[in-house]
Image (spheres, helix red, strand yellow):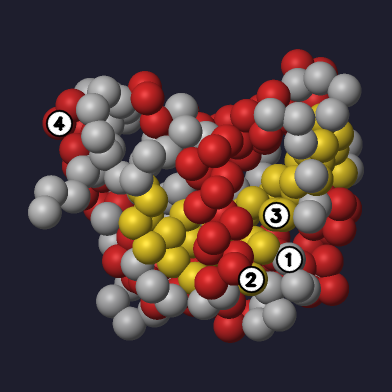
Amino acid sequence: MKAGILGTGMVGKTIGTKLAQLGYEVKMGSRAANNEKAAEWVKTSGHKASQGTFAEAAAFGDIIFNCTSGMASLEALKLATAPNLNDKILVDVANPLDFSKGMPPTLSVCNTDSLGEQIQREYPAAKVVKALNTTNCSVMVNPSQVPGEHDIFICGNDAEAKAEVTKILKDSFGWKSVIDLGDITGARCSEMLLPIWIRLMGVYKSPNFNFKIAK
């Protein structure tokens, strides 16, 4: 399978590296085809790794991961172009964190809307699945890094797309518990976990923790 990674930050590199290790062909996309961060990643990620523009990565991927900064996601997806996103699973890992007033960040959208919903509205033919946005990137691809039982959340309008993402999360990344929050409006819930996640990171002085739903 081919995966397109949008974004060259820690999240994009971590997910891209894991997918390449699993045997995916992975193209990392950014604004410029010769992005230096992407080039460094390609050098260390084996022959299945490549780089290109947002549009080239989106066109390349059978599945696409939006790992861009949440405040820039809609602009990045615009550069990826709708034809390259249509009828594909778009895993939205981003959070709408606004750092313009310093720390802690606020959410640029919340309560009655979410970044996941904005993306789905903008690209109605894409199969948007919100996932992996409630934990640190190293835990995203290696949940056993946090001891014990803990959960990851997904949501989206397309049941088959969610089933495919759930399979990747469980079989490829090692998640044992994937909680389906329903349609894409569930992104409001998972994105609004970020303020407490950021506060907990300050409390624990580490990003390597996660949420467990006890019932």
Q: Measure how far apart labels 4 and 1 are at the Cα level.
A: 39 Å
Residue at the (36%, 22%) spot, across then down: 145
Would residue 119 be found to the left or right of residue 44 on screen? left
Q: Which residue is mark 2?
A: 127
Which of the two labelled residues, at mark 2 and mark 1, occupies the earlier sequence position? 1
Residue drawn at x 43%, y 50% is 133
Which tag, 4 or 2, sits closer to the chain's start? 2
> Is residue 81 shown above or below 210?
below
Sort mark 3 into few (<14), some (14-19) or many (20+) by Cα contacts within 10 Å. Answer: many
- Disc 4 or 1, which lies upstream in sequence? 1
Q: Residue furthest left?
A: 215
Q: Earlier in the sequence, mark 1 or mark 3?
A: 3
Q: Residue at x 11, y 54 (%)?
A: 215
Decide: marks 1, 3 in contact (CB < 8 A)?
A: yes
What kind of element bears circle 4? helix
Find numbered disc 3 in the image and state the secondary structure of the residue it sits on. Answer: strand
Q: Is residue 153 left or right of residue 49?
A: left
Mark 4 belongs to which amino acid?
Answer: Val
Disc 4 crowd rating (10 Å Cα; few below 14, some 14-19, many 20+) is few
Which residue matches tag 1? Answer: 88
Q: Which residue is mark 3?
A: 64
Q: Who's the residue at 72% across and 54% down the image?
A: 63
Q: Position of residue 44 (x, y in %)?
A: 76, 16
- How far apart are the two marked residues, 4 and 3, measured between alpha carbons? 33 Å
Any mark on residue 203, and which? 4
Q: Position of residue 141 (x, y in %)?
A: 50, 32
